[in-house]
Image (cartoon, rainbow, N blue to C red):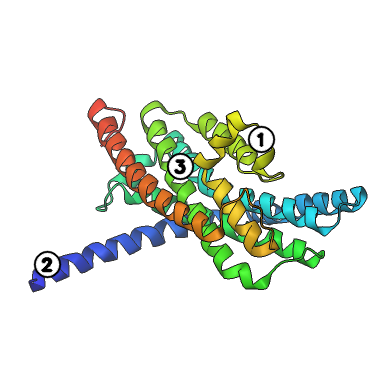
Amino acid sequence: MTAATLSSERRFGRKVLDTLEGYIRIDLVEERMFPLSTVLRYAAVVFPVLLYYFQSTFLGTGQDVFVFMLIGTAVIAGLQDALTGLTSRLQFAQERGTLETYLIEPVPWALIPVAMNIWRSVTGAVLACLMVGIGWLLGAPIHVAGIPLSLVALFLGIVACNALGTFAAAFIVLFKRGEPVVMLFSLAASVLGGALFPISVLPEWIRWLSYLVPHSYVISAVRQLLAGETSPDELSPALSLGILAVFCVVTMTFGLWLFDRSLRLARKLGILSI
């Protein structure tokens, strides 16, 4: 490999890092511009935790039901930003007419979905951890030994939801709409993922759909790791992590390719002014 090739690769790597850093900086500026919104966003996660805590106390169901609903809700909250953050920001950029300015950077277009949503993905994970932490302070029995693998499961779930978000983003690029589809999938995932009840209670004719959404694997793995709850109807955490890893590779690869192709088609059709 020649010195010129190495230098070119270093410059490209530097551009990629600069792009990621640039998008994160934009998000940090927006966080500082609206500090009250940021504070309220984090404060809002306290209320569902308190709701499930007092509900389990009132019904006399004990801490087991509390931790069951707590983990499911925390995972859903953590994955929500990863699922909807890209489409929200992309549609906002289209409305403001700034999308084209993102595309003129000398980096692959497939990098844009990753860069645009990296900060929201991180904050989503922080929200999930914050909810579990508050539940632990209220007495939820959390197995500390399961935290590392739980974070791995949450990370894979966030990557999977980012990949799914790229499909909706490709739709938005071409048709200017996509939010209703994402919101419908998000609501369906809350039910099919078993956030507040085990998926085994679902009718058989719809239960198979649970295995098509990453939420079910993340929630199942995190519950077993943090709460020590096992069921013969659930997959083992190791198997759930393996399925999530394969899901991430397949959907992210195809999603980024589709997003890149949608941008090229939009430019050819005159939808993008570049």
Q: Amino acid under label 2?
A: Thr
The answer to whether 87 is drawn above or below residue 160 in the figure is above
Q: Nearer the viewer, residue 165 or 203?
A: 203
Q: Earlier in the sequence, mark 1 or mark 3?
A: 3
- Residue plotted at (42% across, 46% down): 163
- Residue plotted at (31% across, 34% down): 262
Q: CA distance from mark 1 to mark 3?
A: 26 Å
Q: Earlier in the sequence, mark 2 or mark 1?
A: 2
Q: CA distance from mark 3 to mark 2?
A: 34 Å
The answer to whether 212 is drawn above or below residue 70 in the figure is above
Residues packed near mark 2 inside 10 Å, few (<14), some (14 to 19) or many (20 plus): few
Residues packed near mark 1 inside 10 Å, few (<14), some (14 to 19) or many (20 plus): some
Left or right, 17 with respect to 193, comes to: left
- Residue plotted at (55% across, 50% down): 217
Circle 1 is placed at which residue position?
202
Q: Quadrant for the C terminus, please.
A: top left
Q: CA distance from mark 2 to mark 1?
A: 56 Å
Using the rendered image of the protein, determine whether residue 104 is visible from the camera's viewpoint.
yes
Looking at this view, name the residue that lies furthest to the left: 2
How far across and how far down the image is residue 251, in percent? 39, 45
Q: Mark 3 or mark 2, which is nearer to you? A: 3
Using the rendered image of the protein, determine whether residue 28 is visible from the camera's viewpoint.
no
